Amino acid sequence: MGCHSAKFVNEKGAEKVRDAILKYEIKHPVINDDKMIVWRNFERKSWPGLVVLSPRGVPILILSGEGHRQVLDIFLSVAYDFYYDKLNHKRTIKWAPEEQKEKEIIHKKENATISESVEEQAAREQNLRYPGKILCIEKQADLNRNLIVVSDSGNNRLVIINEETMKFEAQIGNGKIGLVDGNYEEVQFHHPQGLCHVFREN
């Protein structure tokens, strides 16, 4: 389970946390520790931190910082065997991923059960999800128009738009997370951000 103990005031809001969960496609539950209660109870001093609890809720391992994968792999394999008979193997907590909630909200909006602003409607119709950067490609010898390229980070693709008509022209990437070269349909990105256009003369 994740726990967000905000360092800055503008990071404490529930909507900010939800937005980050959706942006980075986090699948596990996250506590919004906006009053730093969990932080103080576990005597945390720095970000990030890892706390492993026993089935009774007692801390059995506390790590600070990054780069502890090997330690965690060894510790969790031993702890799992040791506590196996003490674990509750039935699901006791019901929770709904924010991604699923987002789909339900979109579905309701599409059926006109929830009012939305002009900006919200435009964003939904354009189907952009957390766009990262934008790049303009000017007319060239083999290009008779200006193009705008948007890194659609949440959809793992690049979107090409005609600058004059503001119409969609092409999509680069099949939407799957990956690092694969190929043509427009084959290439895969992992939440693309920065853009760079290299002009090559034939």
Image (cartoon, rainbow, N blue to C red):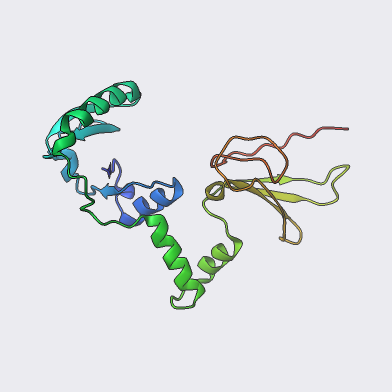
Instruction: Give the left or right position of residue 162, taking residue 19 as reference.
Output: right
Does residue 140 appear anywhere in the picture?
A: yes
Q: In the image, is 124 to the left or to the right of 1?
A: right
Residue 53 versus residue 12: which sits nearer the camera? Answer: 53
Asked if one can make out residue 116 in the rendered structure from this viewpoint, the answer is no
Residue 21 appears left or right of 169: left
Residue 141, image x, y percentages: 88, 42
Is 145 left, or right, of 76 in this rendering?
Answer: right
Q: Residue at x 33, y 21 (%)?
A: 70
Quarter in which the C terminus is drawn: top right
Report the residue at 73% width, 41% height from top: 183
Residue placed furthest toward the front? 85
Q: Position of residue 28 (x, y in %)?
A: 33, 46
Which residue is depicted at the point 22% across and 25% down? Answer: 78
Q: Quadrant of residue 187?
A: top right
Residue 72 against residue 181 in the figure, above or below = above
- Front residue of 194 and 181: 181
**Residue 14 drawn above or below residue 59:** below
Q: Quadrant of the N terminus?
A: top left
Q: Is residue 145 above or below residue 101?
A: above
The image quadrant that residue 125 belongs to is: bottom right
Tell me residue 107's x, y (percent): 47, 69
